[in-house]
Image (spheres, rainbow, N blue to C red):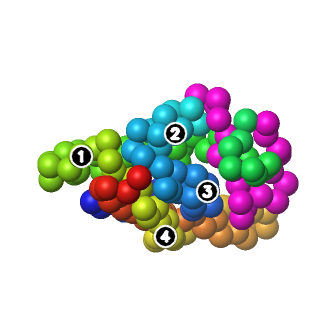
Amino acid sequence: MRAALREKNISPKHSREVALAIKGSSIEKAREFLENVIAKRLAVPYRRYNNEVAHRSNIRDGFFAGRFPQKAAKEFLKLLDNLESNAEYKGMDLDRLRIVSAVVHRGTKLERFTPRAMGRASPKIGMLVHIELVAKEGLA
């Protein structure tokens, strides 16, 4: 079962870390984890983008650096709801579903310009994100 979000205005780096944190878990455990991240009870472990990231005591998986990326977690919750409704429509057993793939790709660039002194301007580039979750049934 597959669900995807396209062109979302969230951080690609935060999205990647959230995707790695929920990969391999059931839909219910992933939902509980994301709700705890939004409530700032559990931190998302930062594996790659952890330069100057504070250590947290409430991180699972043996990592130290972590944050609470609330905007990314809210978008992943919407995607989990979509994945669950897709699986229900197909007649799959929701208790046996596991997230086997969580992929984040960079999307379109948002290019803007910030005015500077002496009539100059500096570019300000933002990134949109594509997120895709794949869940399979029957994995223990």
Tell me residue 46's x, y (percent): 70, 54
Tell me if residue 104 can be seen.
yes
Q: Provide the residue designation for mark 1.
A: 93
- The image quadrant of residue 28 is top left
User: Overall secondary structure of the magenta stretch?
Assistant: loop
Q: Provide the residue designation for mark 3.
A: 17
Question: SS class of the residue under badge 2?
Answer: helix
Tell me residue 113's x, y (percent): 61, 65
Most extreme residue toward the front is 140
Q: Residue at x 32, y 42 (%)?
A: 95
Q: Provide the residue designation for mark 2.
A: 34
Are the residues flagged by discs 4 and 1 in contact, CB closer than 8 Å?
A: no
- Distance of label 2 from label 4 (alpha carbons): 20 Å
Q: Residue at x 83, y 44 (%)?
A: 55
Say left or right for 29 vs 117. left
Question: SS class of the residue under badge 1?
Answer: loop
Work out whether 106 lies above or below 58.
below
